[in-house]
Image (tube, rainbow, N blue to C red):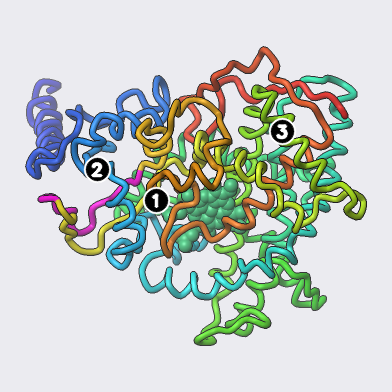
Amino acid sequence: MIVNILLYVVLPIATAIYIYFNRKFNHFKERGIPHFKPSFPLGNMQGIGTKYHSIDIIKNVYDEFKGKDVIAGLYNLNQAFYVVTDAELVKNILVRDFNNFVNRGMYVNEEGEPLTGHLFAVRDEKWKFLRNKLSPAFTSGKMKAMYYTISDKGKDYVSLFDAALEKSKTLDIKNFTSRYTIDVVSSVAFGMESNTLKGQNDELLVIFKELFGEEASRNFFKFFFMSAFPEISKKLHLKLFSQKISQYFINVIGKNIENREITNDNRPDFLNMLIQLKNKGSIDGEFSKENKKITLNEAMAQTFVFFFAGADSSSTAIAFALAELAHNTEAQNKLRAEILEKTKGKENEDINYETLQEMTYLNQVVNETLRMYTINSLLLRQANEDYKIPNSNHVIPKKANIIIPMVGFHYDDRYWKNPEKFDPERFTPEEIAKRPNHVYLPFGDGMRNCIGMRYGLLIVKFAIATTLRNYKLKLNPKMKYPIKLDPKNPLLEPEGGFHLDLERI
Ligand code: HEM
């Protein structure tokens, strides 16, 4: 009996799977595209999440094939990804030939899971519609109006540090930067004063950890599976987000929209602008080509993505910047001197919106942090049609997934001398002018770049400036330098966490 099962069931299935994978694994060989030899079943992703971070794998492909060809192959399980290794091709895909690369190839199921219908994931006409509607919410005028929340939460941020320092001088700073960005982004995106800095709202912290903490590792594979097999995923009723996460956001956002409508609360924040788009099809005072309204579900999905895309990225950037400054005393002192100089004589010596724009060294520090710790280490695009790569014999086939490995470009020693070194001097105007375009893109580029870049930069700069003005920083010996990323966390987190010693100034 067992022999029969092996012979007539297990063996044919195993053979079919093997043949299927083998056929898939011939994709790049048949097209003459350089790649590392894949192996069953993970393709080129052997060791991911245990020995290697996904960044190590992508960087390895980039480093091996850069300068040899403009594109290389990578098998993520059985899925073929085209990895761009040439700056000119990056420009062509993101900017010049954008119309052929509008989508990211991500999973969307608006009927079955409304939160997946957000700007980051939606495709083609739907994306164009939403991006046109949402862009006026991110102008400098709107950013300035929303700056109040950033500086207001800054007071709670400092109070929390002060209270913690009474118990210990060594702090896990990510715990502070996360609470800060959660409080800012949840306030402007879904109108919730979450006050995690004041020790309230544990539920949102739990949700945040589920979205971005260790549980995110399991979701990472689910995300790839569902993006690779969207139709099967829909049939199987798979959900990208847990019931807890979906319900939480739908309830909170839905309730807050209702409250604002009843009370006629007109705060100048993202939530109000989304309500205006839902009720009138345009944002007050902004020109709109057509007045088609967005639906309640669309409004909810966008508030969710502002939180999803904005909160962790900003807090991670702040934490890495502070860790690097803690290690690099010279840069820390130089930046503190700039902050003190620019705020001197200002009302309450506040770090206001204008002052922040004047801090050029702060800008350099943030740029260098995002080079070394590129929060979105890769940009994703999908080809709408076959694409003949200019000045090359290769063709990127229709529907192919493309990776633009920014993490590779950001460490390429052809563009960055001694790339492992934290050196904000790389970002003086003279040094920038020496580099080709498109080798530094922490916020992506082209029409589908980061819509929240300006707001993200304000949050990050304000938090760094506030921390440095109030505290001297040193790395605690618990935190090893150079910082090594934790391979078990698909996001960017140092092995062992962030541990800094703070001293009140
Ligand atoms: C330091 C902070 C941030 C970093 C490093 C960052 C980085 C990025 C990157 C690399 C992309 C992909 C761009 C591309 O594919 O070309 C992106 C897209 C996006 N980001 Fe950000 N981001 C940050 C903050 C924010 C904030 C604060 C928000 C919202 C308020 C936001 C909302 C979005 C959205 C909605 C998209 C998708 C845009 C589209 O597809 O049209 N991001 N971000």
Q: CB atoms at circles 3 and 1 under 8 Å apart?
A: no
Q: Name the residue under label 1.
A: 437
State the quadrant of the C terminus: top right
Outermost front residue: 430
Please check the rendered image and state whether residue 69 is part of the magenta-colored stretch, yes or no.
Answer: no
Q: CB atoms at circles 3 and 2 under 8 Å apart?
A: no
**Residue 384, position in %: x, y?**
25, 63
Q: Seen in the image, is 325 located left or right of residue 381? A: right
Mark 1 or mark 2, which has the lower sequence index? 2
Mark 3 or mark 1, which has the lower sequence index? 3
Q: Seen in the image, is 93 located left or right of residue 333? A: left
Q: Residue at x 39, y 55 (%)?
A: 107
Q: Which residue is drawn at 12% across and 35% down?
A: 22
Q: How crowded is mark 3: few (under 14 residues within 10 Å), some or many (20 or more)?
A: few
Q: Which residue is drawn at 80% across and 55% down?
A: 352
Magenta-highlighted residues? 392-404
Residue 198 in the image: above or below residue 329: below
Amino acid type at mark 3: Lys
Residue 450 in the image: above or below residue 329: below
Residue 470 in the image: above or below residue 305: above
Mark 3 or mark 2, which has the lower sequence index? 2
Asked whether mark 3 and ligand 1 are closer than 8 Å, the reply comes as: no
Q: How far apart are marks 3 and 1 (CA)?
A: 28 Å
Amino acid type at mark 2: Gln
> In terms of image quadrants, where is residue 191?
bottom right
For label 3, the SS is helix
**Residue 9, position in %: x, y?**
13, 32
Q: Mark 2 points at which residue?
A: 79
Q: Mark 3 points at which residue?
A: 334
Amino acid type at mark 1: Asn
> In terms of image quadrants, where is residue 274?
bottom right
**Residue 140, position in %: x, y?**
65, 66
